[in-house]
Amino acid sequence: MSDIAPNPNDPPVASVTVVYQGPVAPHWDVRSDFGDKAVVDDFYRRLNARLMLVPPHDPQFRRNRERVIRDAERENILLAWDPPELAESYSPR
């Protein structure tokens, strides 16, 4: 992890989609479209530590989701959520 903010003109180093797999743990999977495997694996480890046992309806999810988003921004990783509603907020159905 780097303490230097990425230059907004630099191309992303990786693209990652965080996929909600359902109510039974593990809840999350990470899929990468491009990028160095080591960068994606390191990001996955940090994401997994924050979200492993936290489903979207858990109050802790919002805080941890924000940490994951900041981590992706800091590492210059394109981040997407599946379903996309998880990127904004979650309301149980």
Image: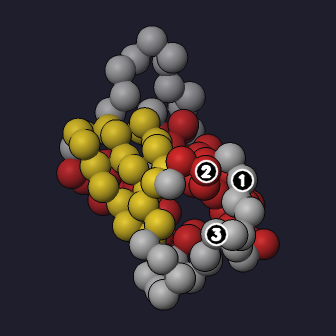
Which residue appears farthest toward the front when viewing the image?
Answer: 93
Dividing the picture into quadrants, the one containing residue 26 is bottom left
Q: Position of residue 30 (x, y in %)?
A: 36, 60
Crowd class of label 3 (few under 14; some 14 to 19; many from 20; radius 10 Å):
many
x and y percentages locating residue 16 in the rendered image: 37, 47
x%, y% of residue 6?
50, 26
Q: Are marks 1 and 2 in contact (CB under 8 Å)?
A: yes
Per the model, the C-alpha gap separating discs 2 and 3 is 10 Å
- Disc 1 crowd, CA 10 A, few/some/many (<14, 14-19, 20+): few
Mark 2 or mark 3, which has the lower sequence index? 3
User: Residue visible at 72% across and 76% down?
Assistant: 58
Q: Name which quarter of the figure residue 76 lies in.
A: top left
Figure check: 83 above or below 72? below
Marks 1/3: CA distance?
9 Å
In the rendered image, which quarter is residue 60 located in?
Answer: bottom right
The C terminus, quarter of image = bottom right
The reply to whether residue 2 is in sight is no
Q: Amino acid at mark 3?
A: Pro
State left or right for residue 58 relative to residue 25.
right
Q: Which residue is label 3 attached to?
A: 56
- Residue 21's place in the image compared with 85, above or below, is below
Residue at x 40% of width, y 17% of height = 10
Mark positioned earlier in the residue sequence (1 or 3):
3
What residue sits right under mark 1 in the picture?
A: 89
What's the residue at 21%, 51% (across, down)?
37
Three-letter amino acid code of the residue under disc 1: Ser
For disc 2, the marked residue is: 85
Which residue is at a point 38% across and 67% down the rendered structure image? 29
